[in-house]
Structure formats: structure tokens, C-alpha cells
Image (cartoon, grey):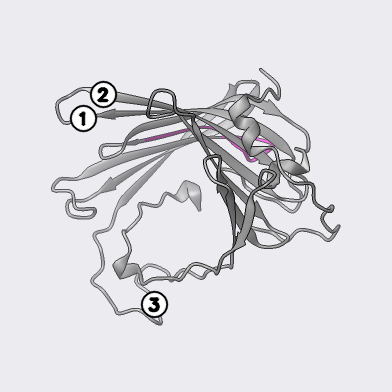
Amino acid sequence: MRIGIFGTVTAIALTGLAQPAPSQQQAPRVPPAHGVTMAQKQTPFIAEFKVTRVRTLADGTTTTQEMTEVKAADSQGRTMTSTTNPSRAAGQPATTSVSVFDPMTQTRTTWTSSGQRAAVTPVAPVRIPRDGEPHPQCPVSAPSPKREFQTEDLGTETIDGVEAHGRRVTITAPASADGNTAPMVRVHETWTSMTMRLTVREINDSPDTGKTTTELTSLTLSDPPLSTFQPPEGYEVVNRDPPVQTCPAVQAAPVTSPVAQ
């Protein structure tokens, strides 16, 4: 297993301004972020992934897109996800998008390698009404067709030196649930570390979006440098208001999986 080697593009996400050390107060418990399940004390790591997306077009031909992803977490509970997309035009550099969550300040900071600005947005806990429960500020809409979930235990497997437990969830959406004229089957498979709660392999297979496979290629078990969670030097930091919640009736209904809950 390759340990802690970063490419030049990845370094864009890991170079930033030096800031004072965070306070030593205990980080509050926060929900999972980007495949990392947080506990009271986070196991620090830096993990690199290869992401492959394959789509089958209407004429039967396929397209393949490859990306790289870096995920990091420190013992204070901060998490970072950096995704690098290849250039779409010859001679143009690849683009890296970075998202950092800080449970101590309850904020999410995002920036891209192609810009010069980082946005800081508060992340407030949101209570989501249960199925069938009316939203206090939204009109009552007709219930959507129910999806069927089937969960399979795939046992344990060693993936790139990490012992992981697998689970496959098959989601069947009936006709008209997502604008589909016939039942649609989606498969979500995850392999999660037995000790770190880190997803080391993930497969999403859907007729409408294709098959996306995320595989671990490198893992370092140590605290990342503080600059990992900071915008690059010279970036303007802009504070944003919390996102405005909209009624579920006017949102595109997402397909949720019990794995992500």
C-alpha cells in the first residue's frame, strides 16, 4: 500500500495560510461528511482515491471519466475532501474543488483551484420532517411512490491493506417516481473500514447516471498539516449566510440510501 504521496494538483488543496492553533475544547459530535463517520475522537488520516465514472449512451457507446479525490481528517474532527477533474480542453489545467468542514466553528469552507476566493458558510443542524409528516411552512403535497430497499451483507475483505466490511443496497424506484416510465433499479455498494469508519471503496450504479467506482489508492494514518484545512495563500475569504431552506415539494426528490443515514 502506497503511503502519503501527493501529486502537484493535490498540493493546491493542501497549501494555505498559517493560522493560530484551534482551541482545545472538545469538538461536538457531528454528522458524517463525505464517507467519514465522526466519533467523539476522530482517527486522523489522509486518504487518496481514484474515481472512475462510466456511462452508456443511447446508441450503446460508453464514455469513461477518471478523477482523483483526497479525503483527510484530523484529531480535532475537521474533514477535507478535494476532488480533481481532468481538463476538458487540451492545454488547460485540471480543476480541483475543495470542501472543508470544521465542527468547532460549525462552518463549511469551499474553494477551487481556478479561483481566488474561498466561501465560508455556517452549517446549522436541520430537522427533516419524517415521511408523511407535513412541513410547518410548506403546503401538503401528494405522497410520492414508495421505493423498495434491499440490503445485503457482503462480509469482510482486505482492500489495499485495510480490513473493510461491505454492504450493498438495491433501490427499486417504481414507474413515475423520478420521471421514469418503467421501474428503475439503482445499486449502492460501500466497503467501510472496521476501525476507522472510512469508506475505502464505493460503487454507485444507476441507469440514468451510469456507474461510478471510488477506490482507495493511498492511506496515511497521521494528523494532516493544518494547511490542509485552509484556503491557499492569497485567496479572499468571504462569509456567506446559511442556505435558505425550500419546501420539499419544489425540490428534486433525492434517492436516499440507508447506508448514508
In the rendered image, residue 202 lying in the magenta stretch gets the answer yes
* Residue depicted at x 60% and y 22%: 158
Quadrant assignment, res 9:
top right
Which label's residue is closer to the chain start, 2 or 1? 1
In the rendered image, residue 9 lying in the magenta stretch gets the answer no
Disc on res. 210: none
* Residue 150, position as x, y percentages in the image: 36, 43
Q: Are marks 1 and 3 in contact (CB under 8 Å)?
A: no
**Main SS type for the magenta part?**
strand
- The mark tally for this picture is 3
* Residue 228, position as x, y percentages in the image: 70, 41
Which label's residue is closer to the chain start, 1 or 3? 1
Q: Is residue 56 left or right of residue 171?
A: left
What residue would you read off at disc 2? 62
Task: Magenta stretch: give its range.
Answer: 192-204
* Residue depicted at x 69% and y 47%: 230
Identify which amino acid the numbered label 3 is placed on: His
What residue would you read off at disc 1? 57
Identify which amino acid the numbered label 2 is placed on: Thr
Front one among 154 and 114: 114
What residue would you read off at disc 3? 135
Q: Mark 1: which secondary structure?
A: loop
Give the label, 2 or 3, closer to the camera: 2
Q: Is residue 88 above or below residue 16?
A: above
Structural crowding at the residue carrying mark 1, measured as other residues with C-alpha within 10 Å and reported as few (<14), some (14–19) or many (≥20) = few
Front one among 44 and 242: 242
Q: Are marks 2 and 1 in contact (CB under 8 Å)?
A: yes
